[in-house]
Amino acid sequence: MTNRNLALIIKEQNPLMLAAKETVQHACQRMWDRRVGAVLVTDDNSDLVGIFTGRDAVRTLAEGKNPAETTLAASMTPNPTTIAPDRNAIDALRKMTDGGYRHLPVVANGKILGIVSRGDFTGLELDRLEDEGDLWDRIM
């Protein structure tokens, strides 16, 4: 299938979510344990306030911050772009490509449902995105 619905992709997903007050070290350990590349960062109401990825971890270390003392709130990417579960794979791929990121939270009515990453998509979906880019280049 070349354009799956995101709800299907995240159907049985249990995304890694941590409070903004948690430390970078704790988040990195949980990411390692779960073999995931991102943490959805939440506030006290479980609302999405940010995303913390491997890139954020590297930036935190490069800035000389202590991961055992630095909170996710201080290291995350705040207010990440999100996508609704009724959208299709190609819509998510376009957003990630346009934004220059590899993870995209799936949210409906303010509720976190999951997260997709480039690795969640099939070769056919990636090929379609590349074909669109080639067509756009020819038009311009």
Image (cartoon, rainbow, N blue to C red):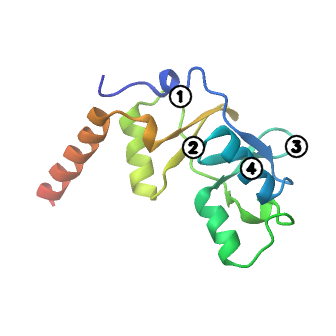
Q: CA distance from mark 2 to mark 1?
A: 10 Å
Percent position of residue 115, x then y: 58, 37
> Label 4 amino acid?
Gln
N-term mark: 3 or 2: 3
| Residue named by callout 1 | 85
In this rendering, would 127 be left or right of 91?
left
Would residue 61 appear left or right of 68 to someone viewing this image? left
Q: Secondary structure at mark 3?
A: loop
Q: Position of residue 139 (x, y in %)?
A: 13, 55
Amino acid type at circle 1 is Pro
Q: Secondary structure at mark 4?
A: helix
Name the spot of residue 29 as percent of width and height, x first: 74, 50
Badge 1 marks a residue whose secondary structure is loop
Residue at image position (61%, 26%) is: 13
Label 4 vs label 1, nearer the camera? 4
Residue wearing tag 3: 44
Mark 3, other Cα within 10 Å: few <14 / some 14–19 / many ≥20: few
- Which residue shows up at 69% across the image and 72% down it? 61
Q: Which residue is mark 4?
A: 29
Counting other residues with Cα less than 10 Å from the Cα at mark 4, is it few (<14), some (14-19), or many (20 or more)?
Answer: few
> Quick one: SS at disc 2?
loop
Rounded to the nearest whole Å, what is the CA distance between mark 3 and mark 4?
21 Å
Q: Is residue 67 above or below residue 3?
A: below
Q: Tell me the kind of residue under disc 2.
A: Thr
Q: Residue at x 78, y 58 (%)?
A: 25
Please name the amino acid that badge 3 sits on: Asp
Sequence-wise, which precedes: disc 3 or disc 4? 4
Q: Nearer the viewer, residue 16 or 133?
A: 16
Figure quadrant of residue 68: bottom right
